[in-house]
Amino acid sequence: MRNRYIFLLIISAAAAAAFLPGQLRGQNAATGRSQGLLGILQHGTWQCALPGDAGGAAYVAVPAEEFRIGTASSYINAEGNGIYLLRGDEVVFTRGPKKDQRFKRLGENTLQKLNPDGSLSKLICTRLGRGS
């Protein structure tokens, strides 16, 4: 009996999403861009690095930017812990030492930091895994 109600709720939500105007589906009225669905990042340690050069290392790790994603949209780094929000392909750290830093999600295990003006920076963070 309960499964039937859950199924009906899912079907209703999908139908509403398909037929509602763009503004009601989470699109920004000013830019027309989709805000995206809420989500979570993969748990584990995320190592951040800058690109290297042809004459040396392929990348240069930046330990000060490293963080670890935990449960309930939380993170921790050497300076403390906080909360993040993943909406669509944008990650925003909303509390803690990384507050107001923004990243673009390039894949399940890769983030690229955004500059304050919204352009992409050179810093890329990659998930090392749960056990790291």
Image: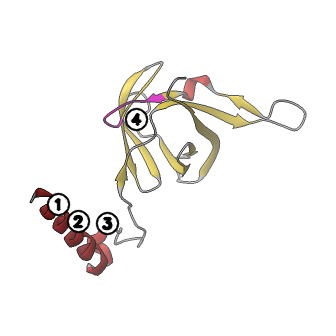
Residue depth check, mark 3 versus mark 2: number of the one nearer the observer: 2
Chain-order first, disc 2 or disc 4: 2
Residue 43 locus on image (x, y percent): 44, 34
Instruction: Determine if the magenta segment contains residue 76.
Output: no
Mainly helix, strand or loop, the magenta region?
Answer: loop
- Disc 3 on helix, strand or loop? loop
Q: Distance between the Cα atoms at labels 1 and 4?
A: 37 Å
Q: What residue type is labelled 2?
A: Ile
Q: Mark 1 points at which residue?
A: 6
Q: How packed is label 2: few (under 14 Cα within 10 Å), some, or many (20 or more)?
A: few
Q: Assess whether mark 4 and mark 2 are in contact (beta carbons under 8 angstroms).
A: no
Quadrant where the C terminus sits is top right
Decide which of 113, 111 is in the foreground and name it: 111
Q: Distance between the Cα atoms at labels 1 and 3?
A: 23 Å
Q: Mark 4 points at which residue?
A: 99
Q: How packed is label 1: few (under 14 Cα within 10 Å), some, or many (20 or more)?
A: few
Decide which of 117, 29 is in the foreground and name it: 29
Chain-order first, disc 3 or disc 4: 3
From what the image shows, is residue 122 above or below residue 99?
A: below
Chain-order first, disc 1 or disc 3: 1
Residue at position x 37%, y 49% in the image: 39
- Res 95 visible: no
Q: Name the residue under label 2.
A: 10
Residue 114 locus on image (x, y percent): 55, 47
Q: Assess whether mark 2 and mark 3 are in contact (beta carbons under 8 angstroms).
A: no
Residue 2 locus on image (x, y percent): 11, 57
Quadrant where the N terminus sits is bottom left
